[in-house]
């Protein structure tokens, strides 16, 4: 029977839930890490990539560097099952629809710490840069058992760089410039020894974009420090800061969406401890985050305290039991343009969860979990998850099946609006049941890999909004149901040692109830901006040891607009070209062209994307 290797597999520095003491990290283990990345987003415990379903994506720092990703949005939009909608140029509002769910159905974490979502219950991923990260990990589908609220769509867990136990000193500085007065500078540094390590990555970006009043600038950094206090005890300190200022030009053709200026300040600091033996590991942390968004109409301010505890216990050679708890308190404020506090309220959450991973045989692995959350403002929620993975070794084929429930509480702004306007509409958390069936296979000596996932998501009490007569005040309400069905198919093929090809296709069918203000009733319709067909394709080439080239294309087809759009958004295919050249062992030149064929389209109706734009830069590594 296959062994779980107790908890020793958690040693690899790429994993933020690493449990083994630093002195036990060997060079061989680090080398193994480079060959076989580990992910934690699927179960909150480290797993090899071939043990997670096709619903999990792992995006390494090396991949993000090659494709010259600058924000997390850039990295995520290449993944199957995702549709990214932006209000025009970089820096403007971005919405992330995972398998057709709402943006606030997906939560974003940094090393297991939930990032502050403000009043909207969705993180401003358009301001989140990739500097200082070792990977971005994505769990598509129901994730509430392990991660709590906003788990209907999935989870994005960003991993900061951990270098404790590595005898390393690395650093880099880079500069970049390009179209629309684009300028970027970035720096990274990491230093590691057996008993301690520290890493830092940050950048500054500014650009004028193309439309009038569409300037954007942002500064951000992520840092991590770890020190070994005793044989089995390690202390850690994480920090993240982001400060962004974007002028937005408003929606073309709308008298209700004029130009404005939005400032976002967001930071997090989190100390924690890890204790680990061969049988048990304990991870505890405290996280404080502050989110402030300022606009002409007023300020949104959310201060959050979070306490988290996770314990992993090896029951035997084939079973691992994990359990944990979380307490979270949000101090929510809304201050209007006259500096008057319109809303000030504490909203709290307390949750407990447990999960069992066990190998029934060498070929069959089972995972099950349960979670309960108490809320101060909404109904409580109890959720469960069950997953089975069966491997047919003769065909190098794995079969995955999962059924899970999940939930998403109302946005803080919804609760605030209902209380301020005294609408008296009781809101319940949205809940969902999801079903997945997946296949993964490698062929021809691993030169070809393909995967397929079929999924269904049934959402109850989906929250909508309207401006009903006679007072026409904004009112939120729970509608009956929404259903989402689809499948994702992906294939990767290594043509030669120097050329790789990847392709994925997503089919999506959605139906929900939308309030028709003119008729005063609910109508069934497709969910807005969920493309029925999404295609991603990429080719990367390494003609020699110093030159790398890549082309990536994204296409979205048959996209319905919202009830407030005068037309449906058009289909589009857009391409990007990237290249880098290692001039020497320490100097690299790089460049890219976005929207290579200068395609004109609106990602969101009334907000045109940038035309063709070119960028060039240089990196000094030491």
Image (cartoon, helix red, strand yellow):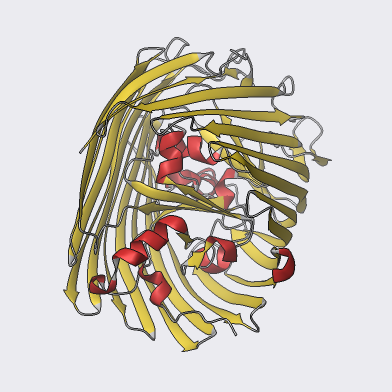
Compare residues 519 and 301 and report the one nearer the observer.
301
- Above or below — where is 125 with respect to 376? above
The extreme top residue here reads 212
Residue 182 shows up from this direction: yes
Residue 91 % position (x, y)? 43, 27
**Residue 601 occupies which quadrant of the picture?**
top right
Q: Is residue 218 left or right of residue 248?
A: left
Compare residues 201 and 20 and report the one nearer the observer.
20
Instruction: Check the picture and name the quadrant holding the N terminus.
Output: bottom right
The extreme bottom residue here reads 316
Residue 258 % position (x, y)? 50, 17
Residue 72 % position (x, y)? 45, 40
Residue 132 % position (x, y)? 31, 45
Q: Is residue 512 left or right of residue 284?
A: right
Q: Is residue 249 left or right of residue 140?
A: left
The residue depicted at 54 percent of the width and 24 percent of the height is 576
Residue 604 shows up from this direction: no
Instruction: Check the picture and name the quadrant holding the C terminus.
Output: top left
- Above or below — where is 583 with respect to 100? above
The residue depicted at 30 percent of the width and 24 percent of the height is 618
Q: Count the labels in the image.
A: 0
Compare residues 345 and 331 and report the one nearer the observer.
331
- Above or below — where is 479 with respect to 617? below
The residue depicted at 20 percent of the width and 80 percent of the height is 231
The residue depicted at 48 percent of the width and 25 percent of the height is 578
């Amino acid at each position: 029977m296959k062994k779980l290797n107790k908890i020793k597999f958690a040693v690899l520095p790429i994993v933020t839930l690493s449990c083994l003491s630093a002195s036990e990290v060997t060079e061989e283990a680090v080398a193994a890490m480079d060959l076989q990345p580990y992910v934690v987003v699927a179960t909150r415990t480290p797993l090899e990539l071939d043990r997670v379903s096709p619903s999990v994506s792992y995006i390494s720092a090396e991949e993000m560097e090659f494709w010259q990703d600058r924000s997390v949005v850039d990295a995520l939009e290449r993944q199957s099952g995702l549709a990214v909608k932006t209000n025009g140029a970089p820096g403007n509002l971005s919405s992330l629809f995972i398998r057709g769910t709402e943006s606030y159905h997906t939560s974003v974490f940094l090393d297991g710490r939930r990032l502050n979502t403000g009043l909207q219950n969705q993180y401003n991923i358009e301001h989140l840069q990739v500097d200082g990260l070792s990977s971005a990990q994505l769990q598509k589908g129901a994730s509430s058992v392990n991660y709590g609220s906003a788990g209907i769509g999935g989870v994005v867990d960003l991993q900061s760089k951990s270098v404790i136990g590595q005898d390393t000193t690395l650093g880099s500085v880079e500069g970049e410039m390009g179209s629309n007065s684009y300028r970027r500078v970035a720096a990274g540094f990491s230093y590691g020894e057996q008993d301690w390590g520290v890493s830092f990555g940050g950048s500054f970006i500014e650009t004028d974009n193309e439309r009038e009043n569409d300037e954007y600038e942002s500064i951000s950094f992520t840092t991590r420090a770890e020190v070994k206090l005793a044989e089995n005890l390690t202390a850690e300190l994480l920090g993240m800061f982001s400060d962004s200022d974007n002028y937005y030009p408003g929606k073309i053709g709308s008298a209700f969406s004029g130009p404005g200026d939005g400032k976002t300040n967001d930071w997090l600091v989190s100390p924690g401890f890890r204790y680990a033996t061969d049988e048990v590991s304990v991870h505890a942390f405290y996280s404080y985050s502050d989110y402030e968004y300022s606009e002409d109409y007023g300020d949104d301010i959310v201060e959050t305290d979070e306490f988290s505890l996770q314990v992993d216990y090896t029951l035997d050679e084939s079973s691992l039991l994990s359990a944990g708890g979380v307490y979270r308190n949000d101090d929510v404020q809304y201050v209007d343009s006259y500096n008057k506090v319109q809303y000030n309220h504490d909203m709290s959450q307390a949750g407990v969860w447990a999960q069992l991973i066990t190998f029934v045989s060498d070929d069959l692995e089972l995972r099950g979990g349960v979670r309960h959350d108490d809320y101060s403002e909404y109904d409580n929620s109890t959720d469960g998850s069950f997953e089975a993975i069966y491997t047919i070794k003769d065909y190098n084929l794995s079969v995955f099946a999962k059924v899970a429930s999940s939930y998403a509480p109302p946005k803080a702004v919804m609760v605030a609006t209902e209380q301020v306007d005294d609408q008296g509409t009781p809101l319940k958390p949205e809940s969902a049941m999801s079903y997945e069936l997946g296949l993964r296979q490698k062929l021809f000596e691993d030169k070809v890999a393909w995967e397929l996932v079929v999924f269904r998501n049934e959402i109850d009490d989906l929250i909508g909004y309207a401006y009903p007569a006679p007072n026409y005040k904004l009112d939120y309400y729970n509608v009956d149901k929404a259903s989402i069905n689809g499948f994702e198919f992906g294939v990767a093929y290594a043509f030669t040692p120097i050329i790789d090809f990847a392709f994925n296709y997503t089919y999506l069918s959605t139906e929900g109830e939308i309030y028709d203000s003119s008729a005063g009733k609910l109508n069934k319709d497709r969910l807005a901006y969920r493309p029925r067909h999404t295609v991603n394709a990429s080719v990367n080439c390494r003609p020699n040891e110093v030159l790398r080239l890549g082309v990536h294309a994204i296409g979205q087809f048959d996209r319905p607009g919202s009830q407030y759009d005068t037309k449906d958004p058009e289909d589009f295919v857009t391409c990007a070209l990237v290249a880098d050249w290692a001039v020497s062992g320490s100097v690299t030149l790089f460049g890219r062209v976005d929207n290579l064929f200068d395609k004109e389209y609106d990602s969101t109706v009334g907000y045109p994307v940038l035309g063709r734009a070119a960028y060039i830069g240089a990196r000094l590594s030491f």
